[in-house]
Image (cartoon, helix red, strand yellow):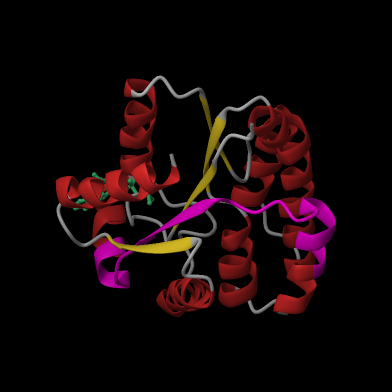
Amino acid sequence: MFGKFITLEGIDGAGKSTHLGWLQDWLRQRAIEHVITREPGGTPLGEKLRELLLHHDMHLETETLLMFAGRREHIAEVILPALQAGSWVVSDRFTDATFAYQGGGRGLGIERIEVLEHWVQSGLQPDLTLLFDVPLEVSRERLAKTRVLDRFEQEQQDFHQRVRNCYLERARRDPARIKVIDSTRPIEIIQQELATLLQELI
Ligand code: ADP
């Protein structure tokens, strides 16, 4: 029996890392086998690509191709073997992020991303995508308190607004898979909603 594939998405500072820890505890408490992973990254090669993607300037097409190169490796080495063994997989970002950042944020044509998605994933899609959503001001305020910004996080406000809009548009088109989580609320309230969504997956 296949495990469940869950992805976490949203603009930076929306709370993905915060809720990833909680999600891991939730799975542990129920003795559900799981793998926690991330993109870009998730494999030794993918982590090297992540370093390049987050810190080196490059052409938009190069950036997109490297994202999908890392994703191919991630799917083949980590995601599919785990799901096939019945384990759940929780990934901090996946292909919705490519649509949002390279498509929405940087303006690469969606149809080109769809070609790569089809090629690299052969139909594999998350069972559930949690889209943590906050207005830009909230994201900026939280990030300012917590970390040194990478190449994506340093982008201007309008870039992040386009990324957020693209995520929300994708959620509108695929509400069965992508659940928008209003992440301006207190963490405990958000986690009650997450628990309900996860329970539905079991
Ligand atoms: P992401 O992984 O999406 O970039 P983080 O989980 O690192 O976001 O959260 C960024 C900051 O915002 C952290 O300091 C975190 O504690 C805080 N934070 C996350 N969710 C909330 C929330 N619902 N209310 C208040 N602060 C939050």
Residue depicted at 60% across the width and 45% down the height = 39
Farthest right residue in view: 119
Report x, y in % for residue 16.
Answer: 38, 48
Residue depicted at 80% across the width and 54% down the height = 122
Q: Does the magenta stretch include residue 147?
A: no
Q: In this view, does 6 lie to the left or right of 81?
A: left
Q: Is residue 128 left or right of residue 39?
A: left
Quarter of the picture holding the N terminus:
top right
Report x, y in % for residue 121.
Answer: 76, 52
Note whether 195 is above or below 177 in the view shown. above
Front-most of residues 59 and 77: 77
Residue depicted at 63% across the width and 57% down the height = 95
Front-most of residues 126 and 94: 126
Q: Does the magenta stretch include residue 119?
A: yes
Instruction: Read off the magenta span.
Output: 115-139
Residue depicted at 80% across the width and 61% down the height = 118
Note whether 190 is above or below 141 in the view shown. above
Quarter of the picture holding the C terminus:
top left
Residue 105 is drawn in which quadrant? bottom right
Report x, y in % for residue 183.
Answer: 26, 59
Residue 4 is drawn in which quadrant? top right
Note whether 146 is above or below 133 in the view shown. above
